Image (spheres, rainbow, N blue to C red):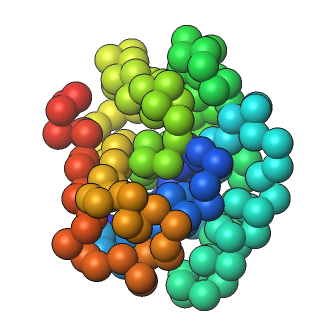
Amino acid sequence: MSSNKLCYMIFCGTSPYSIINSLWASIDIKGIIPTKIVLLVSEKQSSFEKIEKSVSTLIENILEKECSVETLIISEFEIKKNIALLMKYIDSLGEQKKHLILDITPGRKTMSISGVLFANNALKQKIITSEDLHQIIYWHLIDSDKHYSKWYPEIPRENFNYVDLMEVIK
């Protein structure tokens, strides 16, 4: 699923494992090769340098092409505020908004809900089309207690369940 300019937007909780594992699984299993990763980080996150460093390490070791990383601070609980912020951000992307992936896996539940509602609103308002927004990814980790603090290669493949929420909102 590589595209010349693919923007991978990922909601970030506190665990670098869920962020990196979801991104890594998307690259490995689905062939998603982003050229830009946007980390959607809660304003309550005390330090996201570890997350940025983990993402940079993944890019250096896994991706074979250049990929920029950007951080966008969002609210942990204010869903309407997040939707407005994401609408404004998407509008600022210009042509790059034609190739989007939204990963809601590692964010707090309210952040992930913001993502789905943003996508739904953006599609309804024709800010983006269903061709622009390729997927809304949710990697469900089965038996999460056993695998929560392991890196993607350590988790058996049968312990991931891939859900594309675009199938629900199209």
| Residue 80 figure quarter | top right
**Residue 91 in sight from this viewpoint:** no
Seen from the viewer's position, the closer of residues 147 and 166 is: 147
Q: Is residue 31 above or below residue 34?
A: below
Name the residue nearer the viewer: 131 or 136: 136
Q: Can residue 133 be seen in this view?
A: yes
Q: Which of the 4 image quarters holds residue 136?
A: top left
Left or right of residue 92: residue 116: left
Residue at left offset 68%, top offset 30% = 74
Q: Name the residue: 64% across, 48% down.
A: 14
Image side of residue 39 versus residue 132, left or right:
right
Q: How many marks?
A: 0
Query: Residue 96, how many percent across, how many down?
Result: 54, 49
Please indicate whether residue 67 sits to the left or right of residue 23 in the image: right
Residue at 25%, 68% in the rendered image: 159
Left or right of 146, for residue 10: right
Q: Residue 106: x, y in percent? A: 49, 48
Extreme residue in the front direction = 145
Question: Vertically, is 24 above or below 10?
Answer: below
Query: Residue 10, how many percent across, how many down?
Result: 53, 49
Q: Quadrant of residue 69?
A: bottom right
Name the residue rendered at 60%, 77% in the picture.
58
Q: Quadrant of the C terminus?
A: top left
- Residue 16, image x, y percentages: 62, 61
Quadrant in which the N terminus is drawn: bottom left
Where is 20 relative to 76, above or below? below
